[in-house]
Image (tube, rainbow, N blue to C red):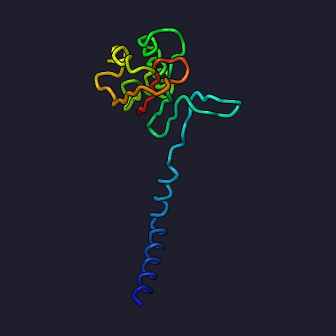
Amino acid sequence: MKSQRRSILKRLFASLAGVTGLGAVAQAKTDATPEKEVFNVTTYQDVPLFSGSTKHGNLIFVAGKGYHKEGDIKVHTDEVLKELEAELKKAGSSMDKVLKVNVYLHDLNDYKGMNEVYKGRFGSKPPVRTTVAVYGGVPGDSLVEMDCIAYV
């Protein structure tokens, strides 16, 4: 008897919620989910492999950037940071809006040189950062690779 009353009450409240528009509000929240935007898609054998950056809502995720030419860690770091900045600008953000950076070093001995170029590049409120030396090295000829997360 009790469970029958609960079932009736549940159906009554559910129908009232639908009549008063609560169902429409819940549906509107689902429909408002922003689409993912991608920039600078890299393909492999004519199949999309990864994007240079992805934007979802007010967040931007920038793929790892490396520098695959001659130069020391300072040259490589400077070029990588320029690439990050360019990717952020394309997506509508900036270095000041970066929340998180991951730094992958080919050699941990380059930590000091990388820091000399890195410092100050993200404004007066720098992002959090993780720095690791990668076993086996960074892909390609880069001495450093960086990726980041920012907001618009």
Figure quadrant of the C terminus: top left
Figure quadrant of the N terminus: bottom left
Determine the image quadrant of residue 146: top left
Q: Is residue 139 above or below residue 24?
A: above
Q: Is residue 130 above or below residue 6?
A: above
Determine the image quadrant of residue 128: top left
Q: Position of residue 91 (x, y in %)?
A: 50, 28
Q: Position of residue 46 (x, y in %)?
A: 71, 31
Residue plotted at (56% across, 34% down): 38
Residue plotted at (44% across, 10% down): 72
Residue plotted at (33% across, 16% down): 112
Determine the image quadrant of residue 97: top left
Residue furthest out toward the left: 124
**Circle count:** 0
Instruction: From the viewer's perspective, tell me whether residue 20 is left or right of residue 124.
Output: right
Residue furthest out toward the top: 71
Residue plotted at (57% across, 31% down): 51
Instruction: From the viewer's perspective, tell me whether residue 97 is left or right of residue 67.
Output: left
Instruction: From the viewer's perspective, tell me whether residue 46 is left or right of residue 123.
Output: right
Q: Position of residue 64 (x, y in %)?
A: 49, 27
Residue furthest out toward the right: 46
Residue furthest out toward the bottom: 1
**Residue nearest the viewer, comparing 75 with 1:** 75
Q: Position of residue 120 (x, y in %)?
A: 32, 18
